[in-house]
Image (spheres, grey):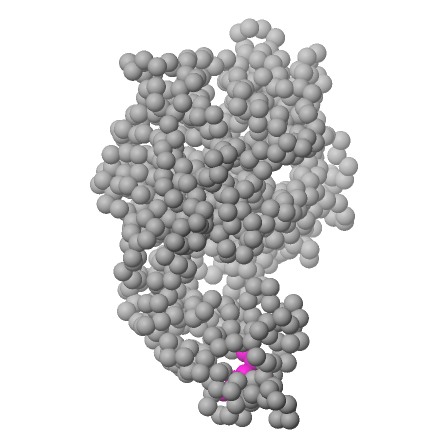
Amino acid sequence: MDYQDKEKRKELKKLEVVWRGSRSLGSSADIFSGIFPKNYEPPPGGFYFEVDDTSPLLQDDPLLFDYNVEERVNDFVAAAVSQANITRTNHIMFTMGTDFKYQYAETWFRQMDKFIHYVNKDGRVNALYSTPSIYTDAKYAANESWPIKTDDFFPYADKPNAYWTGYFTSRPALKGYVRLMSAYYLAARQLEFLKEKIGSGPTTASLAEALAVAQHHDAVTGTEKQHVANDYAKRLSIGYVEAEKLVESTLACLTESVNKSACVNPSTQFGQCPLLNISYCPSSEIELSGGKSLVVLVYNSLGWKREDVIRIPVISESLVVHDSEGREVESQILPLVKASINMRSQYVKAYLGISPSIAPKFWLAFPVSVPPFGFNTYFVSSAKQPGSVSAISTLYPLKGSKSNNIEVGQGHLKLLYDVHGVSHYFDRRSLVNMNVKQTYSFYAGDNGSGADPQASGAYIFRPNGTFPIKSERQEPLTIMQGPILDEVHQQINPWIYQITRTYKGKEHIETEFIVGPIPVEDGIGKEVATQITTTMGTNKTFYTDSNGRDFIKRIRDYRSDWDIQVNQPAAGNYYPINLGIYIKDNSTELSILVDRSVGGTSLLDGQVELMLHRRLLYDDGRGVGEALNETVCVDGTCAGLIIQGKYYLKLDPIGEGARWRRSFGQEIYSPLLIAFSEQDGGNWASSHISKFSAMDPSYSLPDNVALITLQALEDGSVLLRLAHLYEVGEDKDFSQMATVELKKMFPDKKISKITEMSLSANQERTAMEKKRLKWKVEDSPGSEATVRGGPVDPSKLIVELGPMEIRTFIIKFNYIFFLKKFDP
């Protein structure tokens, strides 16, 4: 937490609070939370007992010259009284140890045994080995009223120039990889359930373990050493390879046979492309001649029908796309630009150790429509006649004349570009009309050589000046237009390239950025940010998500719990963004969603800033022990890491932005899973199932509910989690009670038993709620009556979900019913 906040709480005895983290869930989700007076270390007074520590041991042999029982007991009692003076009730907790301690535990326990014995013999305080639950029960029994906390503790600093806001962006490639693998794991687990695998074979277990390890607070945060970051990525890759085999075999089974449980050795071969983001996909880069076609299977892990545009690299521009019913699908060819080709060449060699023999020249883009919790199949073939062929994008270089403006956008959304970039946003449907400007800048990382030796590093964001990145107009802005999407390509400077996309069927902007290698030859580390600036009057206020769920109101240079002294105006106003950030005024909302966790802020009214990449040359002294200076080496030559990522922007009339943030946010979390196969002549539909949904054909999940877990467990039961996506009052239609019909969600199976569990599924919900403590709080902010779903009737099998509610179930199916249904 913030050092200023901590000092204030010590004065007011508010280190322990009841944390009410969700306005929607109210007191039903209260958590008793404690802040330790000194991190999670022993109290002051010399209580470190690792073998090489300098604290005096408690020597209780009176014949030895260093006998010190009375002195050490006094030290212990003094520490206890000091902590008691800033703590409510007569119970306090000492944490004994810290990072890297207990490497030799015997010295610790021998000393603590002695302290407990002699302190209790002294009688002024009572010492005992305890646990968090014993301590919490004692606090509860004291019948005290506790302060309430309704926001979070971000951002925090441990000194005036040491804001821990750099790690919100540190190692953005690893952050992106973790997010990508999380989405893939969710889809792979669903397929594992659908295959109803019996016996041995590839599983998702290895990927699950790698993702679990990657959630460590020094993993996905980017606050680990480089060789450790490499190890996390390697584990994710190993887990992916096994899950990929499971996905491919399951998709083959699902396409070949309705009776999935009978599938053992499917003959269909599917390939996938984990490096599709850098335009490397051997499965799609094939010659389509002699009647051969590329089969593109698109799986949707969301519980509702999905309309999207997919892009795959191809080697020919003369192609045609058909859907699973043989109808021609409108498609578009876009040339592969130099920036993408260069990135592909370098990183395929770095990651796979090979130089691709073929380089695709184009992207093929086409719209897909995929049923919920299912797949659809598309076929790409060589065009036989000129009439039916993918539309080739028209290129317009936009040169330096100020009058040379151009409008892009095939649908309702129109963007006006001048030579400097986007200048105006207009949505013909919603009538939102706004001047918009996008810029780049970098913060120079402080090297710690001044009066305060704090450097900017993996944890700490400490800028030493902000510098705009001017667009070096070496190349004109290039615009590609076609029937499905428009792209605007900008070479911002030699190491920043940007593609802005608008789609005919969508009303948001997609911005893809390629940043790096960040130059550091001048000896200055740099932290690269982009700013989106409007004329909105936002009164210092913006909103960022909390763990992708509730949005929290942020006010620049303000904290609700204390009067903040601002020492770092940029770093002290940065917040973590997992899903998105938005600003609003009296008429309009501007929302930005991200494809990975980053840091962001609003340092000026009407402006949103995202930090995209960081490369620093000094350690910040928080335990990493090395600079955050990521490089990639190919054939012995190393260069700074290049980051490729995306963010998405939309302007809405006031009160309408939540719908896009929530629904499209789920699409970002769960991208379509694409698999490829080949077909030589013949008719795929005669031997394969081309379109499939595991749900009842007439059913999909409500727009305000997400399927976040569907996992087959080892005992044959299934773990199901459903989440309501909206907060109370967030949307006039969707912030209401939602219902899910399990019979329609699993139409081919009979549910024999359903048990509601706690969120972590380690105990039944009823048992957990009986043990739950209801805490008394001071000055309660008058919580509204919370809306929560009722018990599930085992005959109706309808699950209710109130706003922000997540419900977890263990389900047992009667599989005999399933097998009989398809018995010939």
Task: Please identify the dominant SS of the magenta region.
Answer: loop
727 horizontally vs 668: left or right: left
Q: Position of residue 295 (x, y in %)?
A: 64, 24
* Residue 643 in view: yes
The residue closer to the viewer here, 455 or 202, is: 455
Q: Is residue 225 above or below residue 434?
A: below
Tag count = 0
Residue at x-position 48% and y-position 83%: 75
Magenta segment, which residues?
A: 126-130
Q: Position of residue 354 (x, y in %)?
A: 70, 28
Q: Is residue 586 above or below residue 802?
A: above
* Image quadrant containing the C terminus: top right
Residue 648: in magenta span:
no
475 horizontally vs 99: left or right: left
Q: Position of residue 606 (x, y in %)?
A: 27, 38
Residue at x-position 50% and y-position 47%: 618
